[in-house]
Image (spheres, rainbow, N blue to C red):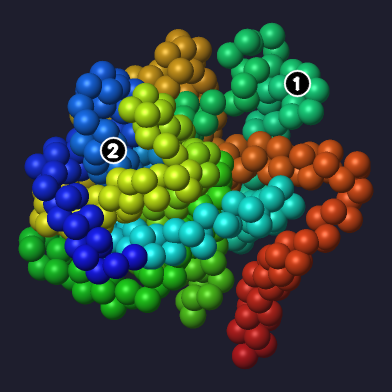
């Protein structure tokens, strides 16, 4: 790509700065409301995207999409409620920071990791889109099985403090994830006659119940979600805490970059998604950390890794859409409908006939992250004050908003009942020391793992050695084995010392 073309692309994207500002503001708000994903918003605004010119429609959709990824980390930190499945890993360390009165620093870590990670991966995608698109050709069912196992091993990490309860939570999550029609014969399993469960357990209502409603019920048992020391710290908080958060993030800038690359690679695989990217990044971040025991207690790197990967996935997921005309996720599928309506020739032809539009997607991402850095970073001081609101006011608001969020993806009253059921289950789990994050990992990754596992066996005629027939797969198996054994070896060395 010539320098002149690159400048023209960025100038073209910059001409829509006002639209990017509107879309990013809306996207952050949408991302912060559990259940209201970018895809739902784009569907609601479909008449607008179909009525305007294609470059304006694409700019709006892309800016809204990346902003929703950033916004999903806000409730994950402040209220222990991930806005989307991609922010679920953020709760593990983000919420403990908030309870200590460090919500402002945690929000700044989220914003810096999201903007730096998204900016870096979007810029990389402009120059490496051809190579990244080939990932879809090399990562098949066998490799995807191993990648998902990286995320599932996080169950064992979470279970380290109480192995039995942690593993029970993860196994129950995997069993719940198996509900629905099986992937070969479409025979219903454990649906109990509910047609709404034939597609599988709905992820958003389960996530909302396990995190939002159960957390709201726990909140009602005390006057404040903060510890006494944390409340005093929050009352004294000012702009110094924002600067402290920026310093904490920039000191770990290399950590942000390499975890965002994990998200970029995972996002380039159609169907992988932000949940896999963020869980794998968190697991790898902990594996190579010098202080793995600090994870889960409010460790800054535990916030940076999933947020950087989450926004890296946003860049990667649009690559198969543009290069292969295969949507990398739900939001990309909605974008495909809009682009098809406008007659955009997706695939290699797009980069020949209209390179400005093709590369303009990533130029819009770069500009969106720059605008969000300026607009949202100062807001961390004010957003963090939510933690000072009394639980008797906060809990009913959370339950009301999240029940609407559970209803919106499929418009089923049944899903609101699912959310309430998981809310009670999550509350009982929290009170008895079981791990809701471990269960959610099983619910999200279990069905994806089973689908790829069964597809690989089906294509190989039932030969189990197919999982060791790929060079890339074998390398991933070795990396997975190392990620399991290295922590055990490190722990053994520490105990011996």
Q: Position of residue 302 (x, y in %)?
A: 42, 63
Above or below, 330 relative to 496? above
The residue sitting at 13% across, 44% down in the picture is: 16
Viewer-proximal residue among 73 and 395: 73
Q: Earlier in the sequence, mark 2 or mark 1?
A: 2
Disc 2: which residue? 58
The x, y position of residue 42, in whole percent, is: 31, 28
User: Regarding mark 2 in the picture, which secondary structure is present there?
Assistant: helix
Label 2 to label 1, Cα distance in Å? 36 Å
Q: Furthest residue to the bottom?
A: 497
Check the picture and name the quadrant holding the N terminus: bottom left
Residue 279 in the figure: left or right of residue 230: right
| Numbered badge on residue 186 | 1
Residue 454 position within the rendered picture, expressed as x and y whole percent measured from the top left: 79, 39
Mark 2 vs mark 1: give the one in front. Answer: 2
User: Does residue 448 appear anywhere in the picture?
Assistant: yes
Answer with the quarter of the image where residue 470 lies.
bottom right
């Amino acid at each position: 790509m010539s320098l002149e073309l690159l400048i023209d692309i960025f100038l073209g994207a910059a001409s829509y700065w006002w639209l990017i500002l509107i879309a990013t503001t809306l996207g952050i708000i949408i991302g912060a409301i559990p259940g209201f994903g970018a895809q739902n918003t784009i569907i609601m605004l479909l008449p607008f995207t179909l009525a305007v010119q294609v470059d304006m429609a694409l700019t709006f959709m892309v800016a809204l999409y990346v902003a929703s990824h950033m916004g999903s980390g806000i409730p994950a930190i402040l209220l222990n409620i991930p806005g989307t499945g991609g922010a679920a890993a953020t709760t593990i360390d983000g919420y403990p920071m908030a309870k200590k009165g460090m919500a402002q620093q945690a929000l700044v870590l989220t914003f810096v990791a999201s903007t730096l990670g998204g900016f870096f991966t979007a810029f990389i995608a402009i120059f490496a889109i051809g190579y990244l698109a080939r990932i879809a050709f090399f990562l098949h069912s066998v490799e995807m099985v191993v990648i998902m196992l990286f995320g599932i091993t996080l169950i064992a990490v979470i279970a380290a403090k109480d192995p039995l309860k942690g593993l029970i939570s993860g196994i129950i999550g995997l069993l719940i994830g198996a509900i629905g029609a099986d992937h070969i014969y479409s025979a219903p399993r454990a649906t109990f006659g509910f047609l709404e469960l034939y597609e599988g357990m709905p992820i958003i209502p389960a996530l909302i119940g396990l995190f939002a409603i159960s957390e709201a019920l726990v909140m009602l048992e005390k006057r404040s979600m903060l510890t006494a020391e944390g409340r005093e710290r929050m009352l004294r908080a000012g702009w110094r805490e924002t600067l402290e958060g920026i310093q904490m993030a920039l000191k770990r800038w290399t950590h942000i970059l390499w975890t965002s690359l994990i998200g970029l690679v995972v996002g380039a695989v159609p169907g992988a998604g932000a949940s896999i990217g963020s869980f794998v990044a968190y697991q790898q971040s902990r594996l190579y950390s010098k202080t793995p025991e600090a994870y889960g207690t409010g460790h800054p790197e535990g916030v940076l890794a999933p947020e950087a990967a989450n926004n890296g996935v946003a860049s990667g997921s649009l690559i198969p859409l543009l290069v292969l005309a295969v949507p990398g996720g739900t939001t990309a599928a909605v974008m495909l409908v809009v682009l098809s309506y406008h007659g955009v020739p997706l695939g290699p032809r797009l980069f020949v006939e209209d390179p400005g539009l093709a590369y303009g997607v990533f130029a819009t991402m770069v500009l969106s992250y720059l605008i969000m850095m300026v607009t949202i970073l100062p807001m961390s001081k004010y957003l963090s004050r939510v933690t000072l609101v009394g639980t008797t006011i906060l809990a009913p608001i959370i339950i009301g908003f999240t029940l609407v969020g559970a209803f919106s993806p499929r418009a089923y009253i049944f899903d609101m009942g699912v959310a309430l059921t998981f809310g009670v289950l999550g509350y009982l789990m929290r009170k008895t020391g079981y791990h809701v994050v471990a269960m959610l990992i099983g619910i999200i990754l279990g069905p994806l793992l089973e689908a790829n596992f069964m597809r690989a066996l089906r294509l190989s005629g039932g030969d189990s050695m197919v999982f060791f027939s790929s060079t890339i797969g074998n390398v991933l198996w070795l990396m997975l084995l190392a990620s399991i054994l290295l922590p055990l070896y490190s722990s053994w060395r520490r105990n011996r010392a």
